[in-house]
Image (cartoon, rainbow, N blue to C red):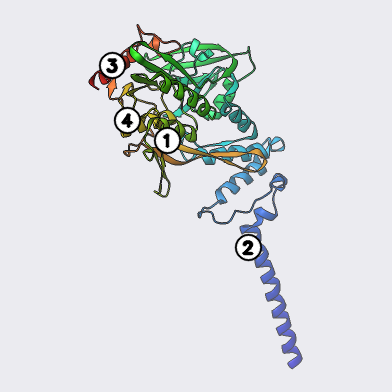
């Protein structure tokens, strides 16, 4: 009896062990099987585990979709898994619905580096996403885009026939760039005239100038800053010393069609116009914490009466300088409402030369005005005729904004 009972117990125990192993295997196959028993295409995927310290999210829908593609898609033998991952990652960043955040491939990173270095082959214009459209911020001076009459806020509908409605700004920029002497066709919609037309441009070597300085009548100096790239600091220092030596009655600072650039550059240039310690810009991050950039001088242009010209091509760092001068010194802004690009992007490098350009904060003027989407409304609103919109040359007859700036600076000087 004891032997039989012991044998029965052994049989029951064996059945329980076999059942447990089967149940464990079943659970492992249903809950985690996609990680270990993948169709052949999955075996190409490395780093399938979720990184630590991420917010809670259910990735099952992603992997289920991936599995359906791998098991059922008719052309699955031709799938490019790396491209699938890149496009899925682009979709992840695009889901932020932020026009200035982008996932960049190695090729796009290279193109961005060339642009930031101030020299590349293309048509010479700054573009951005606005209201889900690819929009011209401003054409660069003496560029093919400016010579063709492209204006700020022109909407680029197509590039060589490719629709841009779902296109990132970096991809659009890459399509517009190309070898010197080649042609690119842009389908443009102009909101001011409700007109759509195709413009063919011949690409050329684009070298972005920093500034120009001219003496006008009655002791007035005209200073135009084209962009806030890294080399501007040296050029501006030389120009500022020339201005100080001229001892002018007033300065007209032209920031029209200036698409912006580096924060360090605009902070440096602002210091020539402001007292040491003056707030230049407030930077507010996603945690609500605020970082303040202040002037460190040298303040050599602080006591010279100044007016600032702006328009709808004035963006980013140019808006920071305009806002800092108005809030600190009550310097009047003349022209048209600015573009409204007041967010801060950080380029975060990833493995294998990928990167993410991500919005990390927004800019506010010293008095707390939010620049992003709002722009800056001038104290004196003056609109130019469309044909004068690119300001390739000083026009003291037809440039109504410049004429108003001369009138206003003379009025300020005469009151002193």
Label 2 or label 1, whichever lies nearer to me, is 1
Pointer 2 or 1: first along the chain: 2
Label 2 or label 4, whichever lies nearer to me, is 4
Relative placement, left or right, of 400 versus 129 is left
Secondary element at image label 1? loop
User: Which quadrant of the structure image shows residue 240?
Assistant: top left
Q: CA distance from mark 2 to mark 1?
A: 68 Å
- Determine which residue is flagged by label 2: 27
Pointer 3 or 1: first along the chain: 1
Q: CA distance from mark 3 to mark 1?
A: 26 Å
- Determine which residue is flagged by label 3: 410
Picture coordinates of residue 280, whole percent (x, y): 39, 37
Label 3 or label 2, whichever lies nearer to me, is 3
Q: Is residue 10 above or below residue 92?
A: below
Label 1 or label 4, whichever lies nearer to me, is 1
User: Which quadrant of the structure image shows residue 2?
Assistant: bottom right
Instruction: Check if mark 3's residue and mark 1's residue have beta carbons within 8 Å.
Output: no
Residue at the image position 65 percent from the left and 53 percent from the top:
34
Residue at the image position 72 percent from the left and 45 percent from the top:
44
């Amino acid at each position: 009896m004891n032997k039989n009972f012991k044998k029965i117990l052994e049989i029951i125990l064996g059945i329980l062990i076999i059942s447990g192993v089967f149940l464990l295997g079943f659970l492992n196959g249903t809950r985690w099987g996609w990680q270990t028993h993948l169709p052949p295409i999955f075996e190409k995927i490395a780093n399938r585990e979720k990184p630590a310290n991420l917010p809670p999210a259910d990735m099952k829908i992603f992997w289920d979709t991936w599995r359906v593609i791998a098991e059922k898609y008719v052309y699955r033998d031709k799938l490019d898994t790396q491209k699938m991952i890149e496009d899925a990652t682009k979709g992840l960043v695009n889901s932020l619905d932020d026009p200035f955040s982008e996932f960049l491939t190695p090729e796009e990173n290279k193109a961005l580096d060339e642009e930031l270095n101030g020299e590349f082959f293309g048509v010479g214009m700054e573009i951005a996403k606005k209201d889900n459209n690819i929009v011209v911020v401003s054409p660069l001076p003496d560029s093919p885009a400016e010579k063709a009459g492209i204006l700020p806020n022109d909407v680029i509908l197509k590039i060589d026939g490719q629709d841009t409605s779902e296109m990132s700004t970096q991809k659009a920029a890459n399509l517009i760039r190309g070898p010197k002497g080649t042609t690119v066709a842009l389908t443009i919609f102009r909101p001011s005239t409700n007109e759509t037309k195709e413009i063919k441009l011949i690409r050329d070597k684009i070298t972005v100038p920093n500034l120009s300085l001219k003496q006008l009548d009655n002791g007035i100096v005209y200073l135009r800053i084209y962009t806030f790239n890294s080399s501007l600091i040296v050029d501006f220092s030389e120009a500022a010393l020339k201005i100080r030596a001229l001892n002018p009655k007033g300065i007209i600072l032209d920031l029209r069609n200036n698409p912006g650039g580096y924060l360090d550059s605009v902070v440096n240039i602002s210091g020539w116009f402001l007292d040491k310690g003056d707030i230049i810009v407030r930077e507010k991050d996603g945690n609500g914490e605020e970082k303040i950039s202040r002037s460190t001088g040298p303040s050599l242009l602080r006591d010279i009466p100044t007016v600032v010209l702006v328009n709808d091509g004035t963006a980013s760092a140019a808006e920071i300088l305009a806002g800092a001068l108005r809030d600190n010194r009550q310097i009047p802004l003349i022209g048209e409402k600015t573009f409204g690009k007041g967010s801060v992007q950080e380029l975060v490098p990833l493995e294998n030369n990928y990167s993410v350009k991500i919005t990390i904060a927004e800019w506010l003027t010293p008095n707390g005005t939010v620049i992003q989407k709002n722009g800056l409304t001038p104290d004196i609103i003056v609109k130019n005729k469309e044909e004068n919109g690119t300001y390739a040359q000083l026009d003291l007859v037809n440039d109504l904004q410049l004429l108003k700036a001369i009138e206003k600076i003379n009025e300020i000087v005469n009151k002193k």
